[in-house]
Every structure is written in C-alpha cells, then in structure tokens.
Image (cartoon, helix red, strand yellow):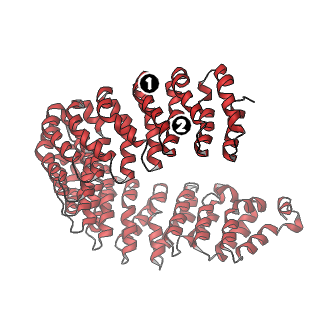
Amino acid sequence: ATSKMAGADSDDSLYPIAVLIDELRNEDVQLRLNSIKKLSTIALALGVERTRTELLPFLTDTIYDEDEVLLALAEQLGNFTMLVGGPEYVHCLLPPLESLATVEETVVRDKAVESLRKISHEHSPVDLEVHFEPLVKRLASGDWFTSRTSACGLFSVCYPRVSSTVKAEIRQHFRTLCSDDTPMVRRAAASKLGEFAKVLELEYVKSDIISLFTALASDEQDSVRLLAVEAGVSIATLLPQEDLETLVMPTLRQAAEDKSWRVRYMVADKFSDLQKAVGPEITKNDLVPAFQNLLKDCEAEVRAAAANKVKEFCENLPEDSRETIIMTHILPCVKELVSDTNQHVKSALASVIMGLSTILGKDNTVEHLLPLFLAQLKDECPEVRLNIISNLDCVNEVIGIRQLSQSLLPAIVELAEDAKWRVRLAIIEYMPLLAGQLGVEFFDEKLNSLCMAWLVDHVYAIREAATCNLMKLVEKFGAEWAQNTIVPKVLGMANDPNYLHRMTTLFCINALSEVCGQEITTKHMLPVVFKMSNDQVANVRFNVAKSLQKIGPVLDSNCLQTEVKPVLEKLASDQDMDVKYFAQEAISVLSLA
C-alpha cells in the first residue's frame, strides 16, 4: 500500500487523505499520534494545492482528540510553511492553529501559540494585517478565557510590522486584557507585558505600559503581581534613568515588601537583573535597603533566594562604594544567615559566600569571612559543609589554603564518613581539586588514608568513584608519587579475604596502568594480576582477563607474547563460562591468537 502512496496515480489520488481519515478514527491513541506525526509526509504526497484545499480544512474541522494528539498537531503545523506553497500561502495555516489556540489544555494552547509566533514572521506585512491581525483580535475578544490568554502571546510578534492604525488597535486590546475579569487572562497579560513593552515606541511605554504595570503589580491575585515584577525588570531596561525613579521604582519598592511571600521571592530571584537595569545610583539608594530586608525576610524561601544572589549583588555594586556598602550593610545580614534556622538558606549562602573573598580582598577575608567559613564547615547539615568545600578555589586565590586547612580537615573527614553515601560520593568528587590546592605533603599526611578507605566502601558507586579519584590524583601528583604512596597499598588489597576488595585491586590497576606508564605497570602491577588469575572466585578470574585486555596496550609486545598470552590461554580453558568468554575476547582484542 505504501508504494501506491509514492506514485499517486489519478485513481489513487485520494489515498493519503483516506488513510489519514482511517488512522485518525482508530481506537488506539498511539496510532492516531503516529499518523499526525506523519503529516508532513502526507502533505508531500498530496502536493501544495491539495494540502491547502483538502488536508488543512479536514484538520481544522474534524480533529477533536486526546491532548497529546492535538499537541503533536500544533507542533507539526508550525513547520508547514513550505508544504502549503511557501510564505504567500502561509495564512492557510491560521484556521487550524486558531482552533488549537482555544482548547482547554494549556500545553496544547501554548504549542499552538508558539507555532503561530513562528509562522507570523513568514507573513508579508500585508498578509499580517489581512489575515494574522484579525485572528489575534478574534482570540482577544473570544468568549472563553482560553482564547484570550492565547492572544496575549501574539501581540508582540505582529505589532512591529503593522500600520499605525492597527498598532493603536493592538495596544487597546492589550489594555483590555490587562484588566480582564478572569485572573488567568490577567496572569497571561502580565507574563507578556515585558515582551510587549520591548516592541513599543518609548512614548507608549510611558503612556500605556507604566499604568498597566502599576495596575498589575497591585492586582488582588499574588500570581499576577509576581509576574508583574518580572515585567518591571524588562521595563526598567527600556526607560531613561531619570524616569525610573518616578515611574518604576515606587511599584518595585512596594513589591519588595508585598504581603505575599511569593511576590517577595520573585523580587529576590530577579534581583541581579533588576540591579543591572536600574544602574548604580538607584542601587545605592533603593536596592541596598531592599536587599537587606529580603535577606532578613520572615519566609525561609525568600531568604534563600536572596542569599543565592549575595555574590552577584556585591559584584555588581558601583566600585567606588562597593567595599563600604558590603561591610556596613550586607555583611551583617550574611553573618546572621550563617546560623539561620533553615538549612536551605544556609546551603544557598554556602554555595556563594566564598565568592565574596575575591571581592573583599585578603585582609577583610581573613578578619571577617574566615570565621564564617569555619562556622559553616562545622554546620550540622552536610549540604552546607559540602558547598563550602566545593567552592574553596576562590578563597585559595585570595588567602591561600593554609589558613583554612586545619579547620578543613575535620569537616572533610566527617563528610568522608557520612552515613549518606551520596554525601561521601560528593566529597570524593572534590578530592582531586582539594589535593591540588592543599599540596602533596598535606595530602599524604592527612587525606591519603581516606582515599584508600573509600576503595573498600560497602557501596559499589563509592568504590568506583574512589578508583577514578586515584587516577586523577596520579595525574596531579605524578607516577613517582603513585609508585611510593598508592601502588603498594592498592596491591596489598590483592590478598584481602573479601573477594570484592580483591576485585577493587583489579579495577584500580585498570585505572592506574595508563597514568603510571609501562615501567611501573610491568614491574609492580602485572605480577599481582598474574597471581590473581589463580583466584578461586570466578568473578575475580574473569576480571583478570578484562584487566589484561585493558592494560595490554601499555605493555611491550615481548611481554604480551611471553607472559600475558600464556595466562590468557590458561583462562580461556577455564571451566567457568564467563572466564572463558572474557579471556577469549582479550586474546582477540590484543591479537594474541
């Protein structure tokens, strides 16, 4: 049947539409979904003319389906321009997308709007006024709130390309939707306010947008107010400095003290963007006090969002007064947050606080920040300790790690032995970084034994990460160090009564052979691998075969022929199936047959 479709002769010409109709009537949703996903193939088979006259009317009139089928349809239609004959016919796609933009399910509407926005750019200015703009008006004055919410996302794409009369109509429609009776519509309008403001001429930003912004920012619904905050940041970037103070700041100041914590959270979350938008003067006079309040907010979520922005906020302060502002206004709040009752707040702060050291310099760091870091390294919450340890590099640059190392140690040891294996895993991942910063002597004396202990952890993921960690340490400290400190300990585990630990030896050898090089591998590691080929546990023996395959490329050809080959041949005749299999595979990969 498919071959018919390719060569659509005159009598078969109805074939693709008929099949589509059949498939879209099928009980099985998956089948219906697949046929929608094949729409472009069907359109190709029909050609542009019949796609316009038959396929699109059919899609517009007959599809009332499951949401996922409609979603697929809305997405497909956004890529249909060429299939209907290019930009001059693109308006044929508007009817099916218009009906999809009014359905009940939000994701379908959003996808339809996304496709409409996409194809709006392919309309000529004339078609935009004749076909697209009337669609936006119909949606904007629809009876159902669903169509009015969809309209909000379409104003900004057609506004820049229409005549001034039509522009005035579009602004009027947007104004109406901003004061719609349905909160969902006001929410949609608020979420698009910033985007719409960006395409408007400055005079209308002042005359229209500001009043809409002020109204939405004092809406009775907090979900509308918080979206207005985001719009406020966009609007602030559009206005000249002298208008900000009178037009935008009163509303944003009020939002920072809103009775709903969600709105205050939004202000905190957007704080850096806001700071960049309003510039240094307003930052000093208005934003510093607002930020202090957010850092002291009664809701933990707000404090956490503000704490997250501490470093960015301080970085973006005007240089001439940066240090003074931080020391007098911000640092006191930060000190309080270090012992906050909520662990999310402490953890958010711990992930950025180290960044302050580069901003404040050595003396301030030693005097004011170091005590805070040390307090956080002793925090009962592992997340907090981990966030401090993972950001050590900033402090290292400013004061050197020596100042911290004595206090770091207990925190590292405690995390390394934490009951939650994910915490242990996280600290292992920072080990190479720490090792590089603390230096080899400190590492050997204090941390080496930890790294070895992880190799015999009861959780496999930890043993695996510990093996990988050794490899990274050797890359940092070199092969000679490995030979003296790591290799003997690893090889010692080959005699462990627990076969899992004996296998860890093999995994370590696999990881280390490449970084340690030929001599150490041949002289020290290979004999241990050979010895383990006689292990009574089959799992160990087949891992010996895998190890020999892994380290083979490091060895010289003489050693491969005279020493490795006999061992693999012996394993290839093992009574265990797996041992045989892996030994044969190693022989063929190393081409020793």
Residue at the far bottom: name it: 143
Binning the other alpha carbons within 10 Å of mark 2 as few (below 14), some (14 to 19) or many (20 upward) gives many
Binning the other alpha carbons within 10 Å of mark 1 as few (below 14), some (14 to 19) or many (20 upward) gives some
Question: Secondary structure under badge 2?
Answer: helix
Q: Where is residue 268 in the image (x, y as percent from the top left)?
A: 26, 56
Point out the image quarter for the C terminus.
top right
Res. 106 in view:
yes
Point out the image quarter for the N terminus.
bottom right
Going from N to C along the chain, the mark reached first, 2 or 1, is 1
Label disc, if present, on residue 506 of the rendered structure: 2
Q: Which of 447 and 157 is in front in this view?
A: 447
Q: Which amino acid type is shown beneath numbered disc 1?
A: Gln
Q: Where is residue 417 in the image (x, y as percent from the top left)?
A: 33, 47
Q: Where is residue 97 in the image (x, y as percent from the top left)?
A: 58, 67
Res. 57 in view:
no
Relative to 197, say whether 354 is above or below.
above
Apparent side of residue 487 relative to residue 448 in the rendered image (left or right): right
Question: Secondary structure under badge 1?
Answer: helix
Label disc, if present, on residue 281 of the rendered structure: none
Apparent side of residue 112 relative to residue 375 in the rendered image (left or right): right
Quadrant of res 116: bottom right
Q: Which amino acid type is shown beneath numbered disc 2?
A: Leu
Q: Residue at x 62, y 64 (%)?
A: 93
Q: Which residue is drawn at 66% across and 68% down?
A: 33
Q: Which of 301 and 593 is in front in this view?
A: 593
Q: Where is residue 184 in the image (x, y as percent from the top left)?
A: 39, 73
Apparent side of residue 540 relative to residue 142 in the rendered image (left or right): right
Q: Nearer the viewer, residue 26 or 356?
A: 356
Relative to 82, say whether 556 is above or below.
above
Label disc, if present, on residue 483 of the rendered structure: 1
Mark 2 and mark 1: Cα distance apart in space = 16 Å
